[in-house]
Image (cartoon, rainbow, N blue to C red):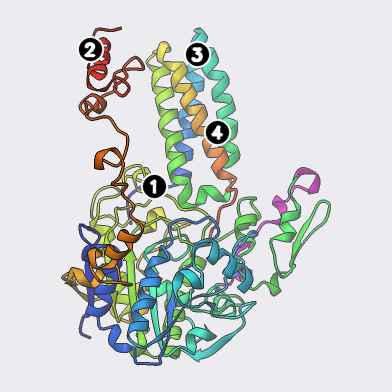
């Protein structure tokens, strides 16, 4: 199998055409993703809108710029995300209403995006399209969010970062979790699975419940489960285990209180399933109709699905585009490994500042023993893509393509008549100088702090010198 | 996989260092040693309490347990070398590292997925 092409531009910027928005559009075209779009095509731009109070997710200007470009190509873009499983008691994106309100708070509204923002799997998350995944490593079917499955073209616009369960969060995870309906996420998280589901994999320790009287917040033990499977009595807790769906709403509640333990295998199996879910999404849309852009910036150790964002573990690395979700993730992962770790970040806590280290499986993974390559290797085995890639350095486009797009006339042409009518500069004041100001000041004086006694403004040049000399003499 | 000691290993090392430090402090008669012994007893209770928590099995436990191990080792070394003047500051650091570990071990608001 020939290596896949991955188009790359680094994160340095010194001009409009080398800014990150420009680079995103440049690699989009270099990778031929624009060629996938025909006039009238419905184009789903799949993003991660970020959990409530997360701050590392991609800024809305990226999907906006991409949507504008797609409209220029004649496509009909919409930006989308999907409802989540509950994952934790205070989830902010588990229904369409909550997802849209959180997305809007994070900046993703139709007014900002220039196109609709859609919850792709319906109000609760059961709006989906079932697809067979015959080559899946673990999953044999997937449930893809309806609006994504109905799109003519899918562009996954992904923030590349770490993830506590998936270890990495890249294009594969944007497909394998992000494009699944809520039903599909139950599947990928292996709800009901005879070996890997929470019901069957978790080690349950009800003996560690010390009674309501000894647990001020005992109510959360019942209230963390949207299916109502935990019942707390005065001195006992019971779990209707066979009905557990692996929604994961209880994990962060039960585990810290000693009621649950999770074997590493449960996490590792989910990581493999993510790549199968990803294949399902690609099959639902069509392999030739899926394109991938990864922005490896603000590379936080945990996903945008947590309600906070830790310091980046490495510096910003750049912008990638490809038709192969496996290759693009492998390219990003290699860049992270090649990079120095960020001083002061969690990478520093783990002594992972030297290039050549496998950072995510240490700083991002929840439990020991997970691999940052499981998604990639599974995605290669199931036919999703290829972990071998050609990294193609991409040249910037002409500057003129990335200047203010709404009116590309030079400023003289745009503003001359208006400035004559509404002159901002008051030429008629102070003999044409316009404003009341000192004629000259000591700019050198204010480059250093001379103490509160030093006042270089009121007395003009002489006053500034006088104060400075006073400060120097210790007055 | 990067080389590092796991949370539980760090914790056991920290407990061992605290026990050695406490035993050595018991043989000394200085005020600093007496004060250190009092703090070390509380630290040992806290470290033993967190040892069976799920947090200790996670990757997240590595940095805070490593900090406890480092500070406990420093305290044990100072007591062994009878460097009493430096001991209160080192004991304070160990106490703070232990409190930080206890707080993190509650995993308040942690999203495991």
Q: Chain of mark 1?
A: A
A65 to B16, vertically: above or below:
below
Which disc is residue B99 wearing?
A: 4
Q: Secondary structure at mark 4?
A: helix
- Does mark 2 fall on the same chain as mark 1? yes
Labels 1 and 3 within one chain? no
Q: Position of residue A70 (x, y in %)?
A: 36, 82
Q: CA distance from mark 1 to mark 3?
A: 35 Å
On whether disc 4 and disc 3 are found on a single subunit, the reply is: yes
- Front label number (3 vs 2): 2
Q: Which residues are magenta?
A: A197-214
Quadrant of the image containing the N terminus of chain A: bottom left
Q: CA distance from mark 1 to mark 2?
A: 48 Å
Residue B23, image x, y percentages: 50, 20
Distance from disc 2 to disc 4, alpha carbons, whole Å, reads 51 Å
User: Dot 2 falls on which chain?
Assistant: A
Q: Determine the chain carrying the residue at label 3.
A: B
Inspect this view and state whether residue A332 appears: no
Q: Residues within 10 Å of mark 3 (few under 14, many from 20)?
A: many
Left or right, A230 with reference to A94: right
Q: Where does label 1 land, which residue?
A: A346
Chain-order first, disc 1 or disc 2 = 1
Query: Is residue A58 highlighted in magenta?
Result: no
């Amino acid at each position: 199998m020939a290596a896949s092409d991955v188009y790359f531009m680094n994160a340095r910027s010194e001009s409009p055409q080398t800014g990150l928005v420009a680079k995103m559009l440049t690699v989009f075209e270099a990778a031929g993703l624009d060629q996938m779009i025909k006039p009238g095509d419905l184009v789903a731009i799949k993003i991660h809108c970020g959990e409530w109070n997360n701050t590392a997710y991609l800024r809305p200007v990226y999907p906006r710029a991409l949507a504008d470009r797609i409209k220029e190509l004649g496509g009909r873009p919409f930006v989308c995300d999907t409802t989540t499983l509950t994952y934790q008691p205070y989830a902010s994106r588990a229904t369409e209403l909550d997802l849209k309100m959180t997305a809007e708070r994070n900046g993703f509204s139709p007014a900002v995006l220039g196109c609709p923002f859609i919850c792709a799997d319906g109000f609760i998350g059961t709006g989906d399209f079932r697809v067979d995944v015959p080559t899946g490593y673990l999953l044999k079917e997937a449930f893809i969010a309806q609006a994504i499955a109905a799109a003519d073209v899918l562009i996954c616009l992904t923030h590349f970062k770490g993830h506590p369960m998936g270890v990495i969060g890249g294009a594969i995870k944007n497909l394998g979790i992000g494009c699944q309906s809520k039903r599909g996420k139950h599947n990928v998280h292996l709800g009901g699975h005879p070996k890997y589901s929470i019901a069957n994999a978790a080690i349950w320790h009800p003996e560690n419940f010390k009674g309501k009287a000894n647990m001020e917040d005992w109510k959360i033990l019942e209230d963390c489960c949207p299916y109502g499977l935990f019942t707390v009595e005065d001195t006992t807790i019971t779990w209707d285990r066979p009905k557990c769906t692996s929604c994961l709403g209880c994990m962060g509640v039960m585990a810290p209180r000693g009621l649950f333990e999770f074997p590493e295998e449960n996490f590792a199996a989910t990581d493999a399933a993510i790549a199968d879910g990803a294949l399902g999404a690609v099959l639902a849309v069509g392999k030739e109709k899926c394109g991938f852009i990864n922005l490896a910036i603000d590379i936080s150790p945990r996903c945008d699905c947590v309600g906070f964002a830790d310091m980046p573990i490495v510096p910003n690395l750049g912008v990638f585009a490809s038709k192969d979700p496996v290759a693009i993730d492998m390219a990003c992962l290699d860049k992270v490994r090649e990079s120095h770790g960020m001083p002061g970040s969690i990478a520093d806590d783990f002594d992972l500042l030297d290039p050549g280290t496998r950072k995510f499986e240490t700083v991002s993974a929840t439990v020991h023993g997970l691999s940052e390559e499981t998604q990639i290797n599974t995605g290669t085995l199931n036919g999703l893509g290829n972990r071998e890639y050609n990294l193609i350095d991409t040249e910037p486009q002409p500057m003129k393509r990335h200047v203010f797009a709404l009116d590309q006339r030079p400023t003289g042409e745009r503003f001359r008549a208006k400035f004559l009518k509404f002159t901002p500069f008051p030429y008629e004041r102070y003999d044409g100088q316009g404003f009341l100001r000192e004629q000259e000041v000591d700019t050198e004086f204010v480059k250093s702090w001379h103490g509160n006694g030093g006042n270089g403004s009121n007395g003009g040049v002489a006053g500034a010198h006088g104060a400075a000399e006073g400060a120097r003499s210790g007055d | 996989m990067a080389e590092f000691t796991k949370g539980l290993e760090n914790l056991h090392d920290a407990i061992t260092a605290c026990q050695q430090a406490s035993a050595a402090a018991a043989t000394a008669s200085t005020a600093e040693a007496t004060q250190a012994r009092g703090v070390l007893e509380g630290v040992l209770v806290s470290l033993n309490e967190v040892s069976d928590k799920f947090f200790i099995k996670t990757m997240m436990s590595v940095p805070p347990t490593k900090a406890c191990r480092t500070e406990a080792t420093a305290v044990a070394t100072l007591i062994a070398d009878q460097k009493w003047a430096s001991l209160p500051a080192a004991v304070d650091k160990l106490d703070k590292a232990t409190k930080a570990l206890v707080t993190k071990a509650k995993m308040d608001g942690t999203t495991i997925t």
